Amino acid sequence: MKTKRRLALEIISLSTARGRLAAFGLATSAIFFSQYHWLANLSLYGHLGIDSPSIGLTRAYWLLIHGNPVAAWERNPLIFLVLAVGLPLIALDVMKVIKQRQRNKTA
């Protein structure tokens, strides 16, 4: 019970590499399994009538993880900048989790 509670807190707070990876995995899974048209009304800026460069990023990510990078670029090219920053951070977190598991095995 304590481990589940701790993991939930790590996911919510994004305070550890394991929590960030779990949050990213959960968010990616939720986006992957949702219908494209469900994502159309997620933008707070769009609802307020404010034109923002981030409008369409979730839909662009949906298109990208469904194997359509050209449509993702057409939806919002900033998705590739977000991934260029995010993927190395995810890779660092994966390495941290692997090192932590190796330390736990030897201890």
Image (spheres, helix red, strand yellow):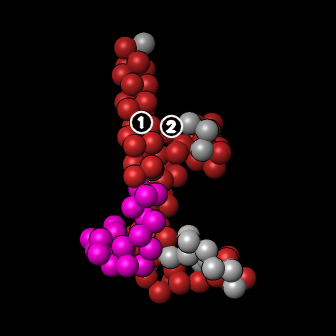
For residue 15, side relative to residue 105 (left or right): right
**Does residue 10 lie above or below 101 as drawn?**
below
**Residue at horizontal 43 percent and vertical 30 percent from the top:** 96
Question: Dot 1 surroundings within 10 Å: few (below 14), some, or many (20 or more)?
Answer: few
Query: For residue 16, what is the image quadrant?
Result: top right
**Residue at horizontal 60 percent and vertical 44 percent from the top:** 14
Q: Position of residue 32 (x, y in %)?
A: 40, 70
Residue 92 image label: 1
Q: Quadrant of the N terminus?
A: top right
The residue tagged 2 is 17
Instruction: Kindly state the secondary structure of the residue where label 2 is placed.
Output: helix
Amino acid type for the residue under numbered disc 1: Leu
Query: For residue 48, what is the image quadrant?
Result: bottom right
Q: Could you tell me how far apart the alpha carbons at marks 1 and 2 are, in whole angstroms?
A: 8 Å
Residue 58 image label: none
Could you tell me if the residues under marks 1 and 2 are in contact, i.e. CB atoms within 8 Å?
yes
Q: Which residues are magenta?
A: 62-83
Amino acid type for the residue under numbered disc 2: Ala
Which of pointers 1 and 2 indicates the residue nearer the eye? 1
Query: For residue 29, what is the image quadrant?
Result: bottom left
**Does residue 102 lie above or below 19 as drawn?**
above
